[in-house]
Amino acid sequence: MDANPAPSPERSDFLRVIVADDLRSGLHESVVTRFPPEPNGYLHIGHAKSICLNFGIAEECEGRCHLRFDDTNPIKEEQEYIDSIEADVRWLGFDWGEHLYFASDYFDQLYEWAVHLINTGKAYVDDLSADEIREHRGTLTEPGQVSPWRDRSAEESLDLLARMRAGEFPNGSRVLRARIDMASPNINLRDPVLYRIVHAEHPRTGDAWCIYPTYDFAHGQSDAIEGITHSICTLEFQDHRPLYDWFIENLPVPARPRQYEFARLNLTHTVLSKRVLLTLVNEGHVRGWDDPRMPTLSGLRRRGFPAEGIRDFAAMIGVARADSVVEVEMLHHAVRDVLNRTALRRFAVLNPLKVVIDNYPEDQVEDIEVVNNPEDLSAGTRMVPFTRELWIERDDFMEDPPKKFFRLAPGREVRLRSAYFVTCNEVIKDADGTVVELRCTYDPATRGGAAPDGRRPKSTLHWLSTSHAVPAEVRLYDHLFAAPYPGSGEGDLFDDLNADSETVLPNCFVESSLDEPAVGQTIQFERLGYFCADLESVPGAPVFNRTLTLRDAWAKLQSQGRHNTA
Ligand code: ATP
Ligand code: MG
């Protein structure tokens, strides 16, 4: 074990500097962080930034990171979300060990502390309605007005709180509020609500409670109970910090966590808000939370993004206090980097055109040896059957090619990858004039893809034997939102959805080795892009999602000096 654990120096950011200082000065002997999701939706790539940060710092310092569900709002929270969040954090590569917690574990303690605040004159039960409380709150420029119930006795508040808890009152009829300062310039300190009446079944506590603490009342105290040393959260909680500190100062908590804020992740062409993502699901704009176009971790996984690529992306963007928008192409760049190294190459034809090789024996089948990954020769080779009738990509042929088109055309010779050179001699069309078949000849001396006389065709195509290829459905994906900054224009956010974000190609073919592909494994279809077998695949009828095209748009943006927009 390292005698002096500290965050990795190559990853230094302002938070890692603070943590290292606190360890060096002896303020803390070890570091405890937490990732605190509310189980009201699936995790998205923004959460991944927070997970990589909290678990990452703990790992680097040999500390620990808790997974804590902030489950204080039973109306929006569900067991399905709890399960998906646990699965997603694990998939991303992190482990909380035995440190799985729920704010609801602390409901008894929080209630005791609410009673403590009443007893010390720092909280009261208010009979105003939610609307009235809002009207009394004031604005940024005007102080709030005190509630007529603010001066009610501690005794009366204690009695009312107990009866709220016992279920005597309907939803919204009363709340417990802190007695702080209705004139505070910080609206969060204008007697915030601590408990509200919600007659709803909780995924964990069932019907044990009908009053629930607010997020603000639960969050900091949960950190204190767990001995969190560094409570890391996003910038929108900066204005809540004085309130969290007020609770910590006015309650007999066992520890004093300190909160630090960092800028949340924003991505172009992407919306990172669980509320919006839930609407996309509920209104049927996508196939579900795990739709391959969704920025959720389950969507990215289904799309074929490896966890390593997402972790690399989190490291690339770093952590800062200034808000910014990251180009989504940067995420794609990180993912391509991993896939280029690791993905096996396979042949697939998305838009098939038949080629018949007239001088090739009718019933002959040759096994052609093809390299699995030119970036990693240890991945070996495989055999792909070659026959007289083949599929090639329709885009790889033009009857009347322009100057820069070097692929197949009448009278022209091309290389079929690892197999033979073929020359197109005749174009067969249907009654509408659509090309339906090419008649070609091959040169038997070019087996393996090289000619003894050294001639080199200008282009190499992928191909499949028509009698061996497996029919497949392929789904092409593009940005879910066409606009780079969704919702920033005139219209509604949903007007910015990309009508062509999904294109389904039902009549594709893939190598027979992909008959029953491993769901979740991302492969490269040669010359076409990265693809991942979808969970809707069935034996003999695989479905593939396009993870990404091969072209690296981020590298291009970078070469133009445009990789990060403020
Ligand atoms: P959303 O805004 O999508 O509803 P949230 O902040 O309400 O997200 P929580 O479940 O409360 O979701 O988030 C858990 C943790 O993840 C919090 O600490 C939050 O600050 C962090 N987080 C949420 N969104 C982002 C983001 N875009 N970038 C970085 N961290 C984020
Ligand atoms: Mg939140």
Image (cartoon, helix red, strand yellow):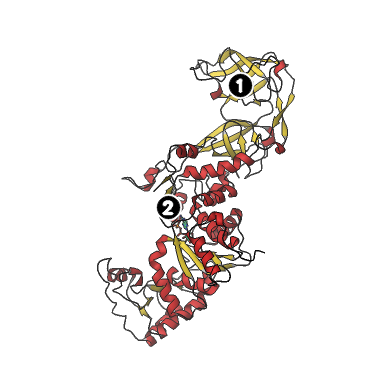
- Is residue 25 visible in the rendered image? The answer is yes
- x and y, in percent, of residue 456 in the image: 63, 18
In the picture, the quarter occupied by the N terminus is: bottom right
Residue drawn at (37%, 79%) of the image:
125
Q: Secondary structure at mark 2?
A: helix
- x and y, in percent, of residue 423 in the image: 62, 15
Mark 1 nearby-residue class (10 Å; few <14, some 14–19, many ≥20)? many
Circle 2 is placed at which residue position?
A: 276
Q: Secondary structure at mark 1?
A: strand
The amino acid sitting under disc 1 is Lys
Q: Is residue 426 above or below residue 139?
A: above
Mark 2 nearby-residue class (10 Å; few <14, some 14–19, many ≥20)? few
The amino acid sitting under disc 2 is Val
Residue drawn at (48%, 81%) of the image:
252
Circle 1 is placed at which residue position?
A: 354
* Closer to the camera in the image, 396 or 374: 374
* Closer to the camera in the image, 386 or 434: 386
- Is residue 197 visible in the rendered image? The answer is no
